[in-house]
Image (cartoon, coloured by chain):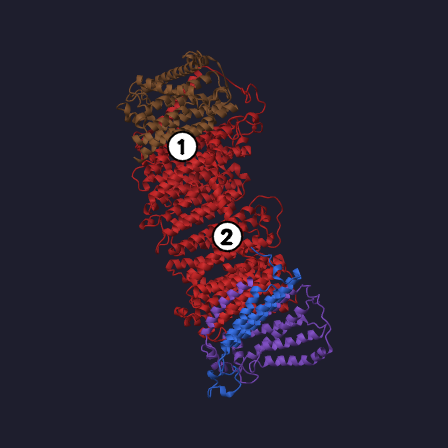
Amino acid sequence: MVNPVVIIAITLIAAFSIGIFQFLGKKFVRGVFWLTVLFDFAAILSIAYGFLTKAIKNPIMVKIGGFPPPIGINLYVDQLSAYLGVVVFFIGAMAAYHWLSRGINDPEPKALVLLLLLLLGSTGMIFTQDFFNLFVFIEITSIASYGLVASNLDSFSLEASFKYIVIGSISSTFVLLGAVLLYKFAGSLNMADISAHINSSMYSGGMLIIISIMFLFGLLIELEVFPMNGWALDIYQGANPAVVAILAGGIVKGFYLVFLRSANYLKFPHLLKIGIIFGLSTYIVSQFFAWKQKDIRRLFGYSSVGQLGLLILAGAFYLNGNLHGFAKKYMLFAIIFFVLNHSFSKSTLFFLADLFGRRRIEEWKGVLSKNKLFGFLFSTSVLSMAGAPPFLGFWAKLFFILAIPKEYFYIVALVLIGAIAEILYYFNLYRIISEKEDGIFDYKGSIVPSLFNVFVLLGLSAFGAYKFFILTGLDIQSGKFLAFITISSVAVFVLGVSRLAQWILSLGMIGALGFHVIKNTSLVPAFNIQSFFVYLVLAGAIMFVFATYPLSKKYSAVFYPLFVFTVFSMVGISVSSNWITLFIFWELMSWSSYLLINQGGKKAAWIYLVMSAIGGYGMLAGIKLLSTGPNLIPSFSSSSAFAVSAWAGILIFTAFLVKMGTAPLHIWARDAYGESPDGFTPLLSGVLSKMGVFGGILTIVYLLPHLSHSDTILYGLAWFGALTALFMALLAIFQEDVKKVLAYSSISQVGYILIGLALATSLGYSAALYHTVNHLIFKGLLFVAAAGIIYRTGTSYLPEMGGLIRRMPFTFLAFLMGIITLAGIPPLSGFAGKWLLYSALLEKRWMFILLIAMFASIVAFMYCYKLLHTIFLGQLRDKYRKTKELPLPLVIVELVLAGLTFAVGIKPNLILSFSEKAIKSLGFTSPGYAYESAHRIVSKFGYWNAYFMGVFAVGSFIIALILFFFAKAKIRKVGQLDIGYSGEVPDSPESVHFGYDLYAHMRRAVRVFIYPHVENTYKRIYNSLMAFVDYTRRFYTGDLNTYALWVVITLSFIFYILYKGVF
Amino acid sequence: MWYKILYAFLVTVGGLAYGLLLGGISRKITARIHGRRGPTVFQNFIDLIKLLRKKTAISHGTMFFLAPMFRLLGGVGVLLLVPIVYGSSILSNFSFGGDLIVVLYFMVFGCLGMALGAADSGHPHSALAPTRGLAQMAGYELPFLISVIGLAIAHKTVSISGLVAAQQGGIFHWNLFQYPFLSIAGLIAMLGMYMAYPFSVVMAPQEIPVGPPTEYSSTFLSFMFSGRSIFGVGKYVLFMDLFLGGATNLVEAFVKTFALFLIIVFVTNVFPRYRTEQAVKFFWTYPVVIGLIDFIRIFIK
Amino acid sequence: MVFFAASLLLIFIGLYAALVKRNLIKIIIGLSIMDTGVNMLIISLGFVKGRTAPIISLKELFKKGTWLVDVSKVVDPLPQALVLTAIVIGVAVTAMALSVVIRMYSVKKSIEIDDFKELKW
Amino acid sequence: MRKIVAIIFLTIVGLYMLSLFAQIPFGKPYKGVSEHYVEKGIEENRGSNLVTSIVVNYRGFDTLGEVTVLFLAATGLSFLLFSCKCLREFKRIRSSLVLRTATDTLFPLILVFGAYIFIHGHLTPGGGFQGGSVIASGVMLLFLAYRKFHVNHKALSTLESLAGISFAGIGLLGLLYAKSFLANSVLPLGQWNKLFSAGVIPLIYIAVGFKVGAELSGLIADMISTTKED
């Protein structure tokens, strides 16, 4: 351990000595600079390491001048300041490296001196325990930043610097006044001494409160809180990003620590109020104002300011929020993780912004694909900033939400809304960046600092996850599983040198996990609802991953890793034992699938992400409502111990409804299904949407019985399901893209499953579970076939196809069986699901829902026929005459699935025997139906013999065939164009192929219903919010006088709310 | 069991004959209304035999080839899944195989097969007809489902035999009188189901030469022809079971189905034709409103 | 009390300049005035009526026979020490601000705020 | 409009602050750490000037920071104005004979006076900062009087650095000898009211004097002409 004061002294001596070394040449100066920074970093690291390993138990107290604290100045280094010091020096070193690699404008030695003194100032600021000394160090920091901010010497940076000088001077005037008045009040300048002189009753006197307000207000200005942060945004926009990276990544955090520490020493009683008002408003306002940003640096600036607001909020709660035990600990870790996350990812983002150099967001188009490393760094930072698991930002947010007391639920809600807004603009940016565009990508400078930063960030993320699972005492199994997921997908990425290797690895990993699950009962103890879904996920995944190989050539190298990640996180969802682990894996699934979809349609992926975020954070808010008392993490079973408001259930259910694509939360589905990579869509439709079903079952079984109005909620859900089933089927009819038809069909089918769930009877669950598996089979089949067809024909536009039966007979056979299953026509497997569902609905007497559900299935025939006809029947185009049958893996998967539909159709027990066990594990005694004989299934209303139907259908088909041949017809095959068409033989296939807008007549009948009301409503909301934000962000006029005026207005506002002595 | 198969075969043959006869009668009545002599009532038999005797068939592909089988299978299936005579273990055919829901979905089987086969020919009109048919189906199924669901809930069963059993005990136990509005909705839906005027846009003999069968000839056509006839009979029986109290013997069954047949014939000859969307809109308004009266009555009971 | 009020007035005059003046130099002057006000305020906080400056050059200020100074005869030295620091810091800030303004003038040939509103929204 | 709003809100803030100062008694005796400074100042430091004792010894760390701030300002200024052509447009005009003659006479006196002030910082009013400023004013006089006068930046910079290093170095010596940074135990305290007394305080103030003098002269030089030196 090094005496902290030595750090300051050595840095000072080095800074002074540069004045001499500059005559010896730049190299010497740089040498001195780097030696000093390295020394400082090592020194602080040794202190921090001491704290971390508990080698240093008490905070370090350093007397200066040999006098005991109230007389002399002293340094006080505790755990937090040591850690923060490490961060500051790390970021500082990285920024210096970055700046040097970009080239510092002359005179370079002076700039290095400024940098050194900036780091020195912030270190002193967080180490000192004397109010006036604090002021001095604040001034050192500020003046160094003034100079550095102006370092570009263009009009932007000079303007920013001048604004900073003026506002900073006002701020330091208040700090100075506050410090001196505190001396006058308490007779001392030492923080601890003053704290000993103060008790909270003195705040009623009026003197102390005004003094404290003045002092803390000075610091608040530096913390960039809402009405007075225009200058800060201008710095983020205008100044040199290297400098901004230090400011945002290190210095501001120093101010933050100082603010909290001062408030703590002053025993300031209104910290919570201040924190909520300013922290929350800063957070929300900046997250929304960032929407309309065109300048990438200012966008990052808004994000930084927002994060700072969140930090202030968290800090206020930590110190003054009456938190106890776990909550306090959680909040502390939330703060630490927020700080670390923001420091490392935001500084990386600023570095990258500087390296590329373009300001306008449009100019960033296609950056991701042009330079892979750059893209990786950018993506990681953005993901962590936006709070995507398993990165650090996610754990910070989770800790924060868990720690907030329940009576402040509105804060949870607002913070989550802000988080959604954050995702919205960050990933709008990401959307633009990840778009494909040709061109040369060049940047000036070194990428090493960003690499270092991201490396540290990744390490910290792992640490954050570790800490989260240890601290919350969640089942460690889940934590280990999370590690397993991450490692295995990274392994797929690293070891997969070619797509083939990646494919084999993915297959192997999924297969291995499946083998493990079957062999090892620790993950899945007995067959229950969870193992039902584990098997579902793994079986689906292995089939779909098998089918992807032929398609994978055009996918990027992250396709298979992300695929594995998504699959495994779905397994994680299925095995999770409490709501929080469920949420964690849920978010993992959402984000990884977002990245996968983003390989295809960018805008679609963005909408998917935003909707997922709405769902996911809704779920988190619901979980928050569930948790009470000391037990902060509600497990599934413990949630029954108390009554909670209906909102908890509704909010949690939102997440599942989004994934199920239930109207009106379905707007992501069409494009996300339609434009995601073809290899991924089967998984998205077949398995991923079923996770919503799983969550729905959990909610309905474990949670809903304890909520008020649970019957109303269930009935409402059933209505949502029914209307989704109907309207999505209607919309599917008029799509002209094969995957979009199937997309609407998917969510329509999942609507049926939702009805089954909402019934909450054992027959309902039977129907839901059966249909879940069955939908996986046939929709997987259809999407795999569609993928193959798109692969062969190069188009997904239905009117372009036609007549492909002649080229792809096997695919047609499988597709036909899939369609028959989808339409629910006996004897294939689709009918059983319909029969079970209708029986369940009849049993419950939900007549209207039954009517709508049945009617929706009639409507479904229309798109079923449309798919078959436009793809396979009609006239084959000339350009497809040489098209081959689909690649072998695809055909294998198709035929296996087709075989399954037939087998299950004749013998539904193949699925029902599993679903029965699953239903029994939910506490039901019977599946709701009975076997009268081996194959005859009876419900209260009706009966049905699948085996007979199958045999009957096949048997009479064969008889008919025999009869047909018996008639001795001689069959002559004729050419494709040899048709009796208006007395003429047509000369080209295109002219007689009927493939476009098949249901024009139907459209005229249902025009009102298929108008995109919901989508337009979303658009309208989004646009009006945008317009509102665009108008209100003019608040930041750019006028220095106005900025200063807002400072004064804010001060009077704070005085007004906290002190009633004058007005 | 085996004797059931034999009986089933007999029922199929009988159904075919009855269906062909009804077709002939319909043509005759229409001709008389038009003031023509018209073909003999046995014309359909003659046609069938003629078609069966033709030796060469033209095929456009696999689906084209299989479609007639599908069609025939669909027709036979529906006929055999519906109990013709209440209480008769023989003439209830294969109704143990499934309840009303099964029948409803099996009804689509044949239509789907025909539509696919026709479309495989590459003739644009033969695809046009199924799309119209499906659209119209979405139209008439709504009132039909209203009446089916209403009856099922009211009688607490979806087994067709169960529904018939519930109507036993005199004419006023028929659903036609117990739930008149449901029955009216169902019968209007039946008009659509038979694709007769005013809902005949599906076949549209004038514009698109008789729809899907255009490209078919000889044996293919004979299969489709017989499938269609059997299917028609099956549906008459179904409607009889649903609304007219079923039948306790074959004569009653003949009478009741013939009555239903007459309704259709007369309506057909009186009204002009709707366009597709007009038909759909019609089905979604009047019969639905009528059906809902009873539907809600059952719902709130 | 008058000293307090006067120094406060100075502070607010300086603030007013920062809030209202459109000329960069005038704003800097305002900041300087504000600094001066703060410094005066600090000094007047340390003043005690009827006492001498904290420079002990006379033997009679000591308590008898010791090196201990009689506290009741000397004004508070700490605010004066603080002011010393504050003044220097004020000078430094002013120097910084002026150099930035010089640069700004060289970029746009203007020292009016209206020409420096590019960064906004 | 802006003026009215500004005045309104400034009045509000002002009223609050006035209400605070109304509660603070003016000219009343103090308590707290200052009592210690006054009472034990001589005993512990032997410097007559209590303010200097505080500035250099009790709160020497502040002063180190203060020196840093000034250094920072000088560095920042030369960083910002280094390549600025903006100042070269202004021609220095030839000064009058009176000024030049007076400068010739006064400059040595000013230097001596400045040196006196910082050397006697622990005994009389004034100290390193004051002395340094006085010296810088002499340099400014030279600038005013002689059109072609310019300072040797290299020398100034070296001086400045050496002075700063010695300040911090004395602090480190304290850490070495007395286990406390900036502790006044390296040199004997000596006699009260003598030049060679008060331990390292005069040394520090001399260093500060040189540093401030050099820095302020450098500032003036930077502001007046920013021509590159070569």
Whether residue A124 sits left or right of residue B107 in the image: it is: right
The tint of chain C in the picture is blue
Q: Nearer the viewer, residue B66 or B284?
A: B284
Chain A palette colour? red
Q: Which chain is indicated by disc 2?
A: A
Q: Does residue A512 lie above or below D203 as drawn?
A: above
Q: Secondary structure at mark 2?
A: helix
Q: Which mark is residue A846?
A: none
Q: Residue A150 falls in which quadrant of the image?
A: bottom right
Q: First in sequence: mark 1 or mark 2?
A: 2
Name the residue type under label 1.
Answer: Phe
Q: Amino acid at mark 2?
A: Phe
Res. A133 in view: yes
Provide the chain ID for the residue under circle 1.
A
Q: Nearer the viewer, residue A538 or A154?
A: A154
Residue A20: where, in percent of width, then height? 63, 69
Drawn colour of chain B? brown
Relative to B167, say whether A63 is above or below: below
Q: Position of residue A861 (x, y in %)?
A: 44, 30
Identify the residue at image location x=38%, y=57%.
A405
Depicted D171 relative to depicted B61: above or below: below
- Give the labeled residue for mark 1: A855
Give percent across and percent down for residue C30: 58, 68
Disc 2 marks which residue? A288
Badge 2: residue crowd in 10 Å (few <14, some 14–19, many ≥20)? many
